Amino acid sequence: MYDLSRVHLIGIGGAGMSGVAHILLDRGAVVTGSDVKDSRPVRALRSQGATIAIGHAPENLELAGELPTVVVTSFAAIPKDNPELLRAAEASIPVIRRSDLLGELMEGYTQVLLAGTHGKTSTTSMAVVALQAAGADPSFAIGGQLNRAGTNAHHGAGDVFVAEADESDASLLRYKPDIAVITNIEPDHLDYFGTREAYFKVFDDFADRVTDEGALVVCLDDDNAAACGERAAARGITVKGYGTAEAAARHPNLTASAVITGEVLDGSNVDVTIKLAEFGTVTYTLGVPGRHMVLNSAAALLAGSLTGADPVKLAGGLSDFTGVRRRFEFKGQAPDGTRVYDDYAHHPTEVAAVLTAAREKAVSEGDGARVVVCFQPHLYSRTQEFAAEFADALSLADAVVVLDIFGAREAPVEGVDSRIITDRISDDSGTTVSYEPDFSVAPRTVAALTKPGDIVFTMGAGNVTLLADEILYALQES
């Protein structure tokens, strides 16, 4: 156990860091921090009582008038020679990861942890909203902001704590879940894990962290997640599956605890019917499109019911779910009817899922809308590893503008740029492709490719989100 009376967070404005900082403040801790730039999360934390410096410096550790009892960092995002880390080492102050801190904050709660290559933020958000509708007041830490609540974390009065379990650096192995959800497993973050086998193994290890009285929840429609569940069941772990009836039939060795028996698409909404093995049938209308979102909602419903919440009330919460920022987020509509959305998708499977949902939305509306995407690849290693898969996924759009790679924590790799994606998009796909290295010109490039009534996406995990408003402006001017 760490002394959390005075906590300093390096990179406090990040999605994960800002969330745990909010919870610390709610619990009465003295919170200080630093970040490279001012931001809305930083300002929100300051208004709550945190003292935050812009820029990194050794003296930031004494923003509260005395040294902190613990320093929190992200080993992936913060370099080891950060001056605040060096000062902490000199003063013999414990330095821990954000996952270590979250693990401490969850002690004593019924822990609901949601993991998977894709869908963690959306599924976690759905679980929180559903539990709130069922009368619970869960604590939560999410990687994105709930549209309705406008926050990514909360210190609740209830005995349940819901959080994402991030696998990117194996930090999910810090937790001891009572209910662990795995939405899907697909190779990613190979810059950290090295091999696909090592990446897959971290989910097996996560399953082994489930408490003796707890349960592992796996998606039956994802063969890798289901296989992880089958291995866990063979080791004596309680495993419950969710998904379609067809997927349940493919995995007869797993208990199908939540089976999707009906999906009816109505514009942007989906009427969902699910049969819960230990309850019966529940229905709800999901306001976020896409088959992947229906599966995510089934996971949230099952996880919520395992905490003891009323499934009917949980389903009501799912009907009220309005989404998460940067997940199929509507940004605005141009005078000609063109609609602009923003999405965080940065893996080929995520890109394909969002564009498929966008295509279904366009078809259901029957207005002949096309799908146009402005995509920014994230990380040189991921782009190099999945260039062909990105090309296939982006070919689902009618027109694609691909920006330069957002390197984030990685240095440029010689010979690796976005053209290794655009060059792979076949002329036979019917997709109009444009490589646009000039970020400032991209909005006009996108606007030139659109037609009235089209559906346009800015997509990626980097700063492409900043272009959504610029594209709307360019559409108005064109």
Image (cartoon, rainbow, N blue to C red):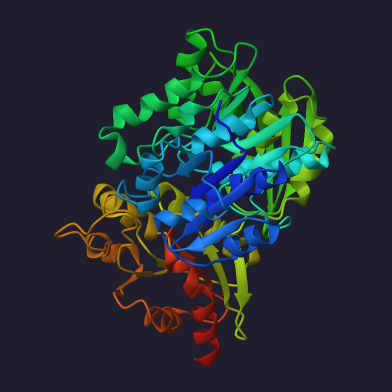
In the foreground, 129 or 59: 59
Q: Picture coordinates of residue 117 (x, y %)?
A: 45, 39
In this view, the residue farthest toward the bottom is: 477
User: Taking the image as drawn, is residue 244 in sight?
Assistant: no
Of 66 and 349, which appears nearest the observer? 66
- Which corner quadrant of the image does residue 48 belong to? bottom right
Image location of residue 405, percent across then percent down: 30, 63
In this rendering, would 129 be left or right of 388?
right
Query: Residue lying furthest front in this view?
Result: 65
Q: Nearer the viewer, residue 87 or 312?
A: 87
Q: Which residue is drawn at 42% across and 47% down?
A: 349
How many discs appear?
0
Which quadrant of the rendered structure holds the N terminus? top right
- 448 left or right of 131? left
Q: Which residue lies furthest to the left in this view?
A: 414
Q: Which of 156 and 313 is in front in this view?
A: 156
**Residue 93 at least partly seen:** yes
Q: Does residue 111 sit above or below 135 in this rendering? A: above
Look at the picture and state if 37 lies above or below 300.
Answer: below
Residue 212, horizontal then vertical, whole percent: 60, 11
Q: Which residue is drawn at 30% across and 38% down?
A: 192
